[in-house]
Image: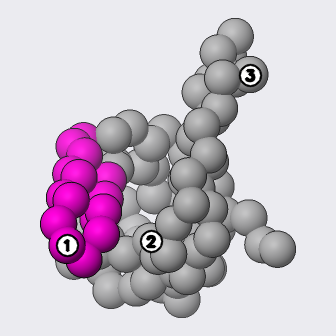
């Protein structure tokens, strides 16, 4: 199973919806832009002159692992997921 690391990620907001269709959860993160992410999504690398972009792409995933830096790294959280998408 391939692993893609999003560095410098932080949680912006979190939504949970519970209705007759089941529980739906969406987490919105911000992360640093990196070469491995570009390669995984088929994006070209950007020059320093690019200040913002609306990027298209989607990653199929089975789990998401959040691992803090430093002394807190042993306190990682793992979630089941179905996709990683909506990159801006």
Q: Is residue 42 visible?
A: yes
- Quarter of the figure that contains the N terminus: bottom right
* Mark number, residue 20: 1
CA gap between label 2 and label 3 equals 24 Å
2 or 3: tag closer to the N-terminus: 3
Residue 34: in magenta span: no
- Main secondary structure along the magenta-highlighted residues: strand
Q: Nearer the viewer, mark 1 or mark 3?
A: 1
Name the element at disc 3. Answer: loop
| Residue 77 left/right relative to 1 | left
Q: Residue at x 70, y 10 (%)?
A: 71
Q: Is residue 88 above or below residue 75?
A: below
How many C-alpha atoms fall within 10 Å of the one at disc 2: few (<14), some, or many (≥20)? some
Q: Residue at x 22, y 43 (%)?
A: 13
Q: Nearer the viewer, mark 2 or mark 1?
A: 1
Name the element at disc 1. Answer: loop
Q: Residue at x 61, y 79 (%)?
A: 40
Q: Nearer the viewer, residue 18 or 12?
A: 18
Q: Is residue 9 above or below residue 62?
A: above
Instruction: Give the residue at mark 3.
Output: 74
CA gap between label 2 and label 1 equals 24 Å
Span shown in magenta: 12-28
1 or 3: tag closer to the N-terminus: 1
| Residue 43 left/right relative to 23 | right
CA gap between label 1 and label 3 equals 37 Å
Q: Is residue 49 visible?
A: no
| Residue 60 left/right relative to 76 | left
Corner quadrant of residue 24: bottom left
Q: Position of residue 55 (x, y in %)?
A: 30, 80
Instruction: Give the residue at mark 2.
Output: 84
């Amino acid at each position: 199973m391939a692993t893609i690391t999003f560095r410098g990620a932080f949680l912006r907001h979190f939504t949970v919806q519970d209705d007759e269709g089941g529980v739906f959860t969406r987490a919105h993160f911000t992360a640093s832009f990196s070469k491995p992410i570009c390669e995984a999504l088929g994006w070209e690398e950007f020059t320093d002159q690019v200040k913002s972009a609306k990027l298209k792409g989607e990653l199929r995933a089975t789990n998401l692992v959040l691992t803090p830096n430093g002394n807190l790294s042993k306190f990682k959280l793992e979630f089941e997921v179905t996709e990683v998408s909506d990159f801006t």
